[in-house]
Image (tube, rainbow, N blue to C red):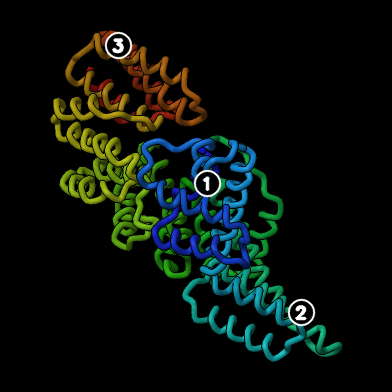
Amino acid sequence: MKNSKLLIALETLGKSEWKELSAFVRSPFFNKRPDVVRLFDYIHENMPGWRQVPDKRQVHEFLFPGKVFDAQSIRQLMSWLMQLTEQYLAYQSWQQDPSGESLQLARAYRRRKLDDHFVQTVDAAEARQDRLPLRHAGYHHTAYLLQEERYQWEASQLRTGRHNLQEMGECLDRAFIARKLRLACLALAHQAVYKAEYEFALLEAVLEALRQQPDMLETPAIAVYHCGYQALVHQDNAAFFQAFKQAIFRHKNAFPAEEWRDLMLLALNYCIRKLNEGQEQFAEEGLSLYQEGLSSGLLLSEGVLSRFTYRNIVAMGLKVGAFDWVERFIHQYKNALEKKHSESMYSFSLARLAYERGDLASALGLLQKADYADLLLNLAAKTLLIKIYYKLGEWDPLQAHLDAMKNFIHRKRLMGYHRQNYLNMVRYTKKLLAVNPYDRAAVEALRLAVSSEEILTEREWLLEQVEGL
């Protein structure tokens, strides 16, 4: 049973969800097999205390004592329980979407020709929609689906006269344009890091439609993503970024928390790219975005802070020299990290802080005692070790470390931007060690090479070392 799809799914359930799933599995409407209930109870009662996950033979012996082992019967029971679990998860998701529930109810009433029931349900659903602060693409899509149900009902009642086709079209246009622009923003952001190429049919038509109908930009979902698209396309013009940032905060309540978090990350990734290009003023911009996201709680998903966000916040704070604030953040949000990543990310962040404060011994100790299973975190730790060895003048350990790091990168499945970035760090550090400091032409050539390298996150540090030769 170890690593089975069933157990992996069940491990994600909270206490209340276990209770709900128990009632779901016991309902004769969904399940008429008592052996599936027994399997559920066996897993529920024993899973938290399992030191070792039992195999199918052990499960069979518990469920069917004294009977000859039949692996197929256990596989079938697990499959049936998995189906029930998936039905429960789908039902739970559906139940959390009142508009979706109302839409399905309205459709059922319309098909049963229960006209009064239908009208009351659609009217109530539309009124509930209007009361919501949300005005994201999903809002407009739901509005379109409700309008479509109303049209289907009206068309069966009224053969002549005006229908709500105009309203349907406007809702559909807003939903489509907002989603098309959102997809374009996500693609441009991904493309900038991984050099992937995307093509979107109708995107230019969407942009032209907005030029012809500028009033569409009053729709929050369209306004925000249009600003984001312009910022990503015109990265050399900071005014577009400022407009995007202002739009995000102006329409913060128009988006679900998860989508607003994605918008924040688009803006933050823009700042990170600008920092990597050497535009230091974007460190302050990025830190203010992170601080706003933390204070609002919207950067956390169900109380969990992404380890990547945690790491980037530390980096941004160190960049602007906010050491005391960073120290408070590291300790305050350690427990908000996923448990499997908390210790490694915590120790690495403290090591970075110690390095920036000049406490190299503490930084080295923190790096050496931590286990960095995450590949990118491992490489970041190796990069920090390069800087510590260099500052301490430990040339032999540094040369050995550079060779080992290069081999490590070649052995790992690291692609695109990250692979090139860390190989460049190794390459230019080796050049830094090899250059003759009295050969000013060679030193200047190295400085120019580092300055012009396209992918190099440690450009500033390398240039500082070149200047110090």
Does the rendering let one see residue 356? yes
The residue carrying pointer 2 sits among few (fewer than 14), some (14 to 19) or many (20 or more) residues within 10 Å by Cα, namely few
Which of the two discs, 3 and 2, labels the residue nearer the N terminus?
2
Considering every residue shown, the one lying at the far right of the view is 159
Give amino acid for label 2: Arg
**From mark 3 to mark 1, how far is it between C-alphas?**
61 Å
Q: Which mark is residue 111?
A: 2
Q: Is residue 397 above or below residue 367?
A: above
Label 1 belongs to which residue? 63
* Foreground pick, 83 / 212: 83
Give amino acid for label 1: Leu
**From mark 3 to mark 2, how far is it between C-alphas?**
75 Å
Q: Nearer the viewer, mark 3 or mark 1?
A: 1
Q: Quadrant of the C terminus?
A: top left
Give amino acid for label 3: Gln
* Foreground pick, 119 / 199: 119
Which x, y percent locates residue 277? 40, 37
Does the rendering let one see residue 223? no
Label 3 belongs to which residue? 399
* Foreground pick, 428 / 406: 406
